[in-house]
Image: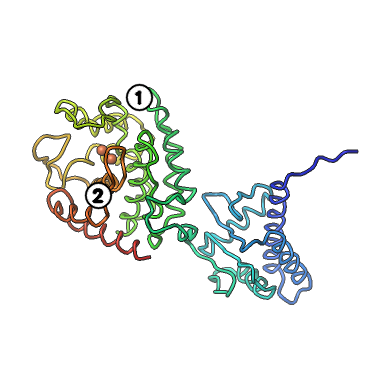
């Protein structure tokens, strides 16, 4: 009888789920019994040997959305054990655990015991690190835009935004569900203390600009909102609105949008209509939060009421969420390298921002934004 030969990847995946199963069993066993109970020692031992089979320099366990990723491989075989580990990690406020090669049996046993205790944070161990931040990105070079090591979830975000917008056809309804996933992904992985510039996606080609820009503006808006203490629910609304702020560009002829030379005045007038087109389009999608079309309409209105689409001064003040998105939009537009224009240095952008503070932008939000980017650069 011939047995099908397993590929290396299949073996690897099997070893990983074997380790996760052993880990969860050991944790559950400890929560049921105690350290003295003989079966605990046995299960902790099994977990330690299963760990050795997958150990490279380290073993990384992380949660992304509802998936468990071990050594960058999503773990799909393990059913309830996976859900159990995700729930336990979340309860501890941990999204990522890194176990280094030199880990001892004793350390691993203490880690299992700590994971089993409810209402207690994880202790620090010499060879096991844990945190709420995706510290994967810390290995990226400081100039985020030049880097090729944009975290996978951001690249995935850009991809989802692209498919949500479809081929740019105005007849196709934007896939809101896909966009919701992107924003929720940002919020769950993203924390203020991580260096935001490392998260921003580089624009690889002109046609990609729309999606990478939308993704970056969303991240930068959520970053600001989070720093201002705005609650989760609203972070989500702002993130979603920021992803859709330029949706009206779907209605502007491509030849104008992608024109590489100087725009004629009638062409510029057409571009200036995109906030209105966007607001009209988004207002029709009833499943969207009300703030989404408002932000699309207001993102080019300035703090002093000038700007477009409305000529002259507006009676109504721009919503504070639109002010946040406008700052993110301005920064990303100048920071992105385009086929016809080099990107600007961050400090040059800040000089411009400060010049326009109080007229184009809310001065408090500008100071906050500059501080946030500075502190993320120093991390
Ligand atoms: Fe815009
Ligand atoms: Fe924009």
- Left or right relative to 143: residue 114: right
Write down the residue under mark 2. 327
Q: Is mark 2 within 8 Å of ligand 2?
A: no
- Residue 62: name its quadrant: bottom right
Residue drawn at (46%, 51%) of the image: 149
Element type where label 1 sits in the image: loop
- Left or right relative to 76: residue 156: left
Residue 274 to residue 145: above or below: above
Q: Is mark 1 within 8 Å of ligand 1?
A: no
Q: Position of residue 158 (x, y in %)?
A: 43, 41
Tell me the distance, in whole angstroms, between the alpha carbons under discs 1 and 2.
27 Å
Q: Position of residue 150 (x, y in %)?
A: 45, 50
- Left or right relative to 321: residue 147: right
Residue 265's mark?
A: none
Write down the residue under mark 1. 170
Of residue 48 and residue 265, the one placed in the foreground of this image is: 265
- Residue 366: name its quadrant: bottom left
Q: Position of residue 75 (x, y in %)?
A: 63, 50
Element type where label 2 sits in the image: helix
Q: Position of residue 106 (x, y in %)?
A: 68, 75
Residue drawn at (46%, 57%) of the image: 137
């Amino acid at each position: 009888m011939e047995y099908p030969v397993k590929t290396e990847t299949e073996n690897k995946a099997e070893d990983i789920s074997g380790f996760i199963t052993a880990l969860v069993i050991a944790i559950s066993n400890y929560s049921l019994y105690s350290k003295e109970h003989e079966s605990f020692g046995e299960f902790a031992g099994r977990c330690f040997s299963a760990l050795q089979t997958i150990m490279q320099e380290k073993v990384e366990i992380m949660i992304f959305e509802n998936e468990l990723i071990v050594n960058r491989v999503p773990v799909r075989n393990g059913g309830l054990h996976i859900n159990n580990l995700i729930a336990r990690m979340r309860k501890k406020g941990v999204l990522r655990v890194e176990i280094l090669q030199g880990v001892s049996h004793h350390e691993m046993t203490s880690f299992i015991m700590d994971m089993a205790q409810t209402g207690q944070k994880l202790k620090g161990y010499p060879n096991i690190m844990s945190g709420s931040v995706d510290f994967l990105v810390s290995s990226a070079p400081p100039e985020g835009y030049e880097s090729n090591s944009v975290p996978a979830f951001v690249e995935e975000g850009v991809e989802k935004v692209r498919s949500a917008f479809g081929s740019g056809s105005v007849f196709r309804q934007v896939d809101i569900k896909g966009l919701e996933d992107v924003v929720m992904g940002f919020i769950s992985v993203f924390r203020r203390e991580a260096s935001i510039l490392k998260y921003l996606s580089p624009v690889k080609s002109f046609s990609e600009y729309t999606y990478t820009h939308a993704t970056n503006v969303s991240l930068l808006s959520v970053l600001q909102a989070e720093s201002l203490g705005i609650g989760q629910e609203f972070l989500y609304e702002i993130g979603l609105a920021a992803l859709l702020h330029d949706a009206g560009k779907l209605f502007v002829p491509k030849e104008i949008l992608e024109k590489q030379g100087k725009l004629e005045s009638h062409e510029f007038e057409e571009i200036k209509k995109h906030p209105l087109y966007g607001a009209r389009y988004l207002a029709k999608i009833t499943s969207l939060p009300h703030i989404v079309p408002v932000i699309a309409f207001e993102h080019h209105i300035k703090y002093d009421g000038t700007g477009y689409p409305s000529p002259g001064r507006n009676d109504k003040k721009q919503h504070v969420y639109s002010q946040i998105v406008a700052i993110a939009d301005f920064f990303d537009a100048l920071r992105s390298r385009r086929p016809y224009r080099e990107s600007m240095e961050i400090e040059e952008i800040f000089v411009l921002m400060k010049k326009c503070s109080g007229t184009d932008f809310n001065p408090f939000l500008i100071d906050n934004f500059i501080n946030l980017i500075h502190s993320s650069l120093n991390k």
